[in-house]
Image (cartoon, grey):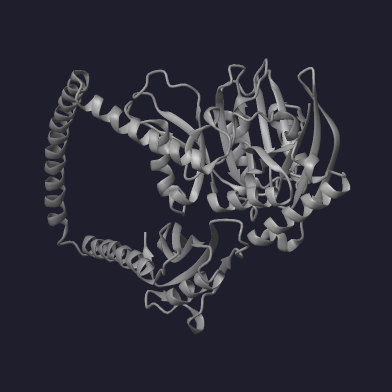
């Protein structure tokens, strides 16, 4: 049996012709073509994918009648998606995993859910449903981008059997022992631990953009922040020091240096020797699983052949079944008994909270009386005034940041810049604010972040030379992400005492 596998990365594509014999895949021939620098833009990338496939088709001598017999298994790099591991401490047993993912994705993904396709996989098995915390790894990709890729492949004269997204598609991989899987892409470093029972035991995703500006470790060559994060997450995995399974690494063609550094890090820190594996030989191109759909929330083991109409019909049926299940649960005696027990627990907790609140109120009253006695002292009065002034400044600063923010701007991190006062004997004050955030693609690009920074510079709450920002950094919009980071640092018009 002969089959074709297409592996898409941000800067290249690789088409492989495979032969299946005795449950083994053999590479008959393969070809890799690279995209231009302009290929990072969405429309240009789609066009270059189509042209590259047509070129390979011609060089391989595949006629239109012959190519229709071959269906592609398309594997997408993790660079085309947004990856996340969500933890739910108290997940109700009446809420499905899909509903939990949907709630988390609504606050994490900067797009409406109907514009993306989402796939998820639970990490481990909960010991008691509804009580134990749940961890779910999920990935989201733009729906219209996915459909454009499908259309480009079909226009090139091929049909699509299945679409897989790295690295979550590896969760159903068969193995006789535990496997540590590492996927080194241009924008993400991911590692997953799989058990022989096809259970995802652990998953971690590290966006490289968060560590690219940090210093590098002399021993491994990796960014220090990334090394620290990897050590923390890997040490949290049980028995990682005594890991007896295999360590597999899938590396992007353009990140050979980082992959080598990561291998050195694993060898030095955990005595793990990694082996390079071909992702095209790991995923079997069976038609029962595919990453495709319209705003779908589907577990990996239940993917179907890509068909938009089928997914919409399936969604409508699932919605009706969901409503029917809710009606049965609401009117069942078991549900009423469960609600009674839960209400009783809530009442008891409310009484305890009421007692604690009364105690806190008495403590607060006692503290207020002591503060009134000390109000007559000059030093205490000065300290109270300083604290009151510092407290009133923060609502003004936060309000100014939100009022100046245009549509399409998110503030993700606000960091005070602290300076020690020499004559203050250990005292310190906040002299500036470092603002980190994201601007949405397609709304004036970097100019949106520049306008926001200049508008803040003109505020009376900040000091700026010639009313311009003294420090500003912004990532350029290249059309391959939902939002792009920026950093602003502004000096306060008057310091805030700590």
Is residue 63 found left or right of 300 in the rendered image? right
Determine the image quadrant of residue 393.
Answer: bottom left
Could you say where residue 390 lies in the image, as x and y percent from the top left?
A: 31, 64
Is residue 160 found left or right of 277 in the rendered image? left
Could you say where residue 101 lies in the image, as x and y percent from the top left?
A: 43, 38
Whether residue 165 is visible, yes or no, is no
Determine the image quadrant of residue 260.
Answer: top right
Query: Which of the two residues, 322 or 176, is positioned nearer the viewer here?
Result: 322
Location of residue 10 with respect to 313 vertically, above or below: below
Query: Which of the two residues, 428 or 235, is positioned nearer the viewer here?
Result: 235
Residue at the top extreme?
A: 176
| Location of the N terminus (image quadrant) | top right
Location of residue 153 with respect to 98 vertically, above or below: below
Q: Which residue is at 71% across, 58% downward?
A: 47
Is residue 213 found left or right of 407 in the rendered image? right
Could you say where residue 339 lies in the image, as x and y percent from the top left?
A: 19, 25
Could you say where residue 33 lies in the image, as x and y percent from the top left?
A: 81, 50
> Exactly how many numbered labels are in the figure?
0
Query: Which of the two residues, 46 or 113, is positioned nearer the viewer here?
Result: 46
Residue at the bottom extreme?
A: 466
Whether residue 190 is visible, yes or no, is yes
| Location of the C terminus (image quadrant) | bottom left
Location of residue 3 with respect to 438 vertically, above or below: above
Query: Which of the two residues, 354 or 157, is positioned nearer the viewer here?
Result: 157
């Amino acid at each position: 049996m002969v089959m074709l596998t297409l592996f898409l990365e941000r800067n290249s594509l690789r088409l492989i012709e495979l032969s299946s014999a005795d449950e083994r895949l053999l590479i008959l021939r393969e070809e890799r073509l690279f995209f231009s620098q302009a290929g990072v833009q969405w429309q240009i990338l789609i066009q270059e994918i189509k042209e590259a496939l047509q070129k390979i088709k011609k060089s391989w001598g595949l006629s239109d009648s012959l190519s229709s017999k071959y269906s592609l298994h398309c594997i997408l790099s993790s660079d085309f998606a947004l990856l996340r591991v969500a933890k739910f401490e108290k997940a109700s047993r009446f809420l499905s995993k899909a509903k939990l993912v949907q709630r988390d994705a609504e606050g994490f993904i900067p797009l409406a859910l109907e514009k993306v396709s989402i796939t998820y996989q639970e990490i481990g098995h909960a010991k008691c449903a509804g009580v134990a915390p749940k961890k779910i790894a999920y990935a989201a990709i733009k729906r219209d981008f996915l459909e454009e890729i499908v259309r480009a492949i079909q226009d090139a004269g091929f049909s699509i059997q299945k679409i897989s997204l790295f690295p979550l598609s590896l969760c159903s991989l068969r193995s006789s022992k535990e496997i540590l899987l590492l996927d080194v892409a241009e924008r993400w470093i991911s590692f997953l631990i799989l058990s022989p029972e096809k259970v995802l035991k652990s998953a971690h995703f590290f966006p490289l953009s968060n560590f690219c500006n940090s210093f590098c470790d002399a021993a491994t060559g990796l960014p220090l922040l990334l090394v620290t994060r990897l050590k923390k997450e890997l040490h949290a995995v049980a028995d990682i020091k005594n890991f007896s399974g295999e360590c597999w690494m899938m590396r992007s063609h353009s990140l050979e240096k980082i992959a080598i550094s990561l291998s050195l890090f694993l060898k030095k820190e955990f005595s793990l020797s990694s082996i390079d594996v071909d992702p095209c030989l790991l995923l079997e191109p069976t038609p029962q699983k595919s990453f495709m759909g319209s705003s779908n929330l589907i577990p990996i083991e239940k993917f179907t052949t890509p068909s938009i109409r089928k997914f919409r019909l399936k969604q409508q049926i699932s919605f009706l079944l969901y409503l029917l299940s809710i009606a049965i649960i609401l009117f069942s005696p078991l549900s009423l008994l469960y609600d009674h027990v839960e209400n009783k627990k809530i009442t008891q907790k409310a009484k305890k909270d009421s007692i604690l609140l009364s105690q806190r109120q008495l403590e607060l009253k006692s503290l207020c009386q002591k503060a009134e006695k000390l109000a007559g002292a000059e030093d205490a009065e000065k300290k109270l005034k300083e604290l009151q002034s510092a407290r009133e400044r923060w609502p003004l600063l936060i309000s100014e940041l939100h009022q100046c923010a245009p549509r399409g701007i998110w503030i993700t991190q606000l960091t005070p810049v602290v300076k020690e006062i020499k004559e203050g004997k250990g005292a310190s004050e906040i002299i500036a604010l470092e603002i980190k955030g994201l601007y949405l693609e397609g709304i004036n690009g970097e100019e949106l972040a520049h306008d926001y920074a200049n508008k803040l510079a003109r505020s009376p709450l900040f000091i700026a030379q010639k009313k311009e920002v003294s420090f500003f950094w912004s990532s350029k919009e290249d059309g391959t992400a939902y939002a792009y980071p920026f950093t602003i640092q502004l000096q306060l018009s008057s310091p805030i005492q700590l």
